[in-house]
Amino acid sequence: MKKNLLLFFFFLCFAMAKSQTNIAPLATPTASTCNTGACTTLNDLSLGTCGTQQMWITSAASNPGSAVFIAFTWSSVKSFNKMTIHVAQDNTRFLGGGTIQIFNGSAWVNHSTFTQSTGVCIYDINFPIATASAVRIIDIVVIGAQSSNVNFREIEIIEAQAAGPPQPPIANFYAPDTVWINSPATLINTSSFQSRVFWDFPGEN
């Protein structure tokens, strides 16, 4: 079971291309009212420690509605499909839900909604791919011991990955032969020609 070295690097590059990229630091964050910390606390990559307040968005009611918002604006159009919320306090002033809107060039339009009923330090919001130059959360729901002034350490926005490159036709290749990064397999060089480099799995035919 021999594989050309080029195939090995093909899968290596494919796996690396699938890594997640946080594009929030490339945006300008704004909010209806940022308190204690500046709005830039939302994307400064200083994740802090769960239980330690970094900043909060001012609101006077449990469900502030569309007047209270958190927004990120880029200088160019981006595609993204996940936010990672780093919560400051997991049992109070917790972001329990909201509406995600994207800017279509002339107006804000609803994209998706989310809920999170369990107080945790970090959680993901997954949604269909959005392509826009700005995104915001409105209709914020605050839950916990104090149901106003939702509290944050950081918000990550994860870039959507394009589909991977098409796999080339390879004779006698099937999924169980695939070598994944960090897989517990030993590869040995069995080259016998100057123009070719082969790799083999010890003990396999």
Image (cartoon, rainbow, N blue to C red):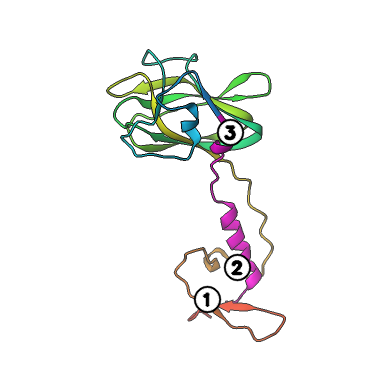
Percent x, y for residue 72?
56, 29
Q: Residue 187 shows which numbered tag?
A: 1
Percent x, y for residue 86?
41, 36
Circle 3 packing at 10 Å, graded few (<14), some (14-19), many (20+), is some
Looking at the image, residue 10 lies above or below residue 91 = below
Residue at 56% of width from left, 39% of height from top?
Answer: 23
Q: Was residue 24 drawn as part of the magenta stretch in this picture? A: yes
* Residue wearing tag 2: 8
> Magenta segment range?
1-28
Looking at the image, residue 17 lies above or below residue 152 = below
Measured in 3D between alpha carbons, the distance from the residue under mark 2 to the one under mark 1, in whole angstroms, is 11 Å
Q: Residue 27 shows which numbered tag?
A: 3
- In the orientation shown, which residue stands out farthest toward the left? 145
Identified by mark 2, the residue type is Phe
Identified by mark 1, the residue type is Leu
Q: Which of marks 3 and 1 precedes in the sequence?
A: 3
